[in-house]
Image (cartoon, rainbow, N blue to C red):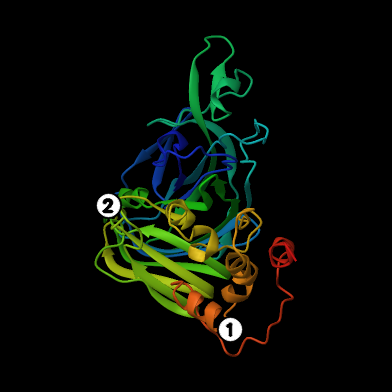
Amino acid sequence: MTSLFINMRTFKTTILLLAICLTAAANDGVYYVNGSQLTPISETDISCAKEVLSIDICDDGFARVDVQYVFMNNGAEKTIDMGFEASAPYNDDSEFNPNGGHPHIFDFTVNLNGKTLGYTNSIVRMDSNFETLDPKKWKVDTEADGFQLVNTSTKESVEYAYAYVFKAHFNPGKNTIHHTYRYRMSHGVGRTFEVPYWLLPAKRWANHQIDDFTLRISTPTWKQFLIEDNVFEGAQFRIVAGKGKIRHAPYKDIESHTEIALKNGTVEWHKTNFDPKDNFTINSSDIYCMFTDNYRLGDYYDRSDTYVPTWNPEDTAQEKRILRNLPYANRGYVFKDKGLREYFSNIWWYMPDPSWKQDTSDFTKKEWELVNQGK
């Protein structure tokens, strides 16, 4: 079952978080239905032989997730409940959906052995039993920024999630599951985007691991992000498509992170006998590099509307030149001006591209505002 939980209250930054939209994605685990409860169990016959997890981080504020599994059923054919729980939005303007469909998840699909499966939605209590909550008896607790419900009779308040549940019939031997969805990424003061993903539910399968695991992160345009090293030990990330750079421990006091700058490409991590020790999060690099001296002047850059380089009245003429040229540097422009060339050569993500023909058709409105500001 795919299990998507984020507790925003334990997020590890002290910066005020605004416009937190969503959730995370997770690995598929196993459940059974007991009355009105959806209860996680450990499967004893079915092993997770392979998983290919592909995550696209897009400029429209959405992440697109594609997960392909190979499961091995070493017992008789059986039907089990699988599912997907998405935590309630936190501190956003979406309305509570009593029908159980998450307001920020779209295009959810499941395919088992070539057959498209249907699914049901419900509201569940976020605890060990995932008790189904009757929306007629619960309403949004407005004092908890929307991620809790309060019982209209008892006044009990609980955190809740939106559940997507489907029945999976496994044949003996090899079975394949393919599911996709897209969801609105979290963002706020101090980070342009956040993409959490839960890996630990994979340990509920019979082998308590993923025998062959591949993570692919793709960016249709340009992204600069961080991943915790503690989850991805024993192998290295590598660029497999497009252009990119990878470095370790990029900022003070976070030696346990890998930073990736990726242009129209894909970075991949692969490991056999993968026993995940924790879940992971892809964070935009501004969460840490915003405290560096040159944050405004290029240490971090993103083309999406949620990130806008800012101008200060006290900027020098040279600083204004740097700001105006950030969109060009981001696309690989080879600067003829010595000062700009030397400056951007010291920005780690800068990747000179002599083949770029100065096609500015993909400049965003806000990038044009940056280029033209102060002229």
Residue 26 tag number: none
Q: The residue tagged with tag 1: helix, strand or loop?
A: loop
Q: Quadrant of residue 49?
A: bottom left
Q: The residue tagged with tag 2: helix, strand or loop?
A: loop
Q: Is residue 43 above or below residue 131?
A: below
* Residue occupying the point 43% across, 52% down: 291
Q: Position of residue 157 (x, y in %)?
A: 50, 19
Give 86 or 328, whichever is nearer the viewer.
328
Q: Position of residue 173 (x, y in %)?
A: 36, 65
Residue that mark 2 sits on: 277
Give the number of the mark in front: 2 or 1. Answer: 1
User: Which kind of residue does numbered mark 2 sit on?
Assistant: Lys
Q: Is residue 46 left or right of 126 when viewed as pictured?
A: left
Q: Give the crowd class for mark 2: few <14, some 14-19, many >=20 residues within 10 Å.
A: some
Q: Position of residue 39 (x, y in %)?
A: 40, 35
Q: Quadrant of residue 146?
A: top right
- Residue 102 visible in the picture: yes
* Residue occupying the point 52% across, 44% down: 23
Residue that mark 1 sits on: 337
Q: Is residue 10 left or right of 321 when viewed as pictured?
A: left
Q: Is residue 89 above or below residue 172?
A: above
Give 192 or 63, whichever is nearer the viewer.
192
